[in-house]
Amino acid sequence: MSVSDAQSTQSVLLAVADYLGKPQRFLTVADARAELKRTLELASQSSVVLTTNGAPSAAIVSFETLEAMRNALMQMLVREMEQSFHLTLAQVASEPGGEPTSEAELESLVRESVRKSRRKTNKPGKPGKPKSARTSRR
């Protein structure tokens, strides 16, 4: 990850943290429905928790904040996956006789697995009518 990507991620996370750090507003579902415009205005400032019978049942956040949270989460997941991949490569390389598998070898293994799977599904003697015995509707 480049320095600018890291800074971008940090700024998004800070903006989300700022939004989520503001006090939540609690409204009943009935009040939120009756005053939808006001509810949306409140959500642009901080999250709004909708309650049913006094218990939290849903939350409303601004779309901008939702997208920022999704973007930040995706960036963190990609970073974790990259770290996990590199750790796995290092573990394979450190094992006796452990050579990382080349892309060509992986493609060959995938092709062979697909062929085996297709052979299993096309084996004769499967229950059901053979194609020639099926009747067609016109």
Image: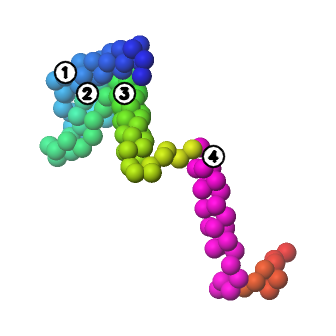
Q: CA distance from mark 3 to mark 1?
A: 19 Å
Dot 2 or dot 3, earlier in sequence:
2
Dot 3 or dot 1, earlier in sequence:
1
Callout in the foreground (3, 1): 3
| Residue type indicated by callout 3 | Ala
Q: State the image coordinates of residue 44 (x, y, percent, origin top left).
A: 31, 20
Left or right: residue 47 compared with residue 109: left
The N terminus, quarter of image: top left
Q: CA distance from mark 2 to mark 3?
A: 18 Å
Q: Which residues are magenta?
A: 103-127
Q: Is residue 126 above or below residue 117?
A: below
| Residue 22: assigned label | 1
Q: What residue is pinned by disc 2? A: 47
The quadrant holding residue 13 is top left
State yes or no: residue 120 in magenta. Answer: yes
Q: Which element carries disc 2, helix, strand or loop? A: loop
Q: Is residue 7 above or below residue 135?
A: above
| Residue 104: assigned label | 4
Q: What residue is pinned by disc 3? A: 72
Q: CA distance from mark 2 to mark 1?
A: 8 Å
Q: State the image coordinates of residue 115 (x, y, percent, origin top left).
A: 67, 64
The C terminus, quarter of image: bottom right
Binning the other alpha carbons within 10 Å of mark 1 as few (below 14), some (14 to 19) or many (20 upward) gives few
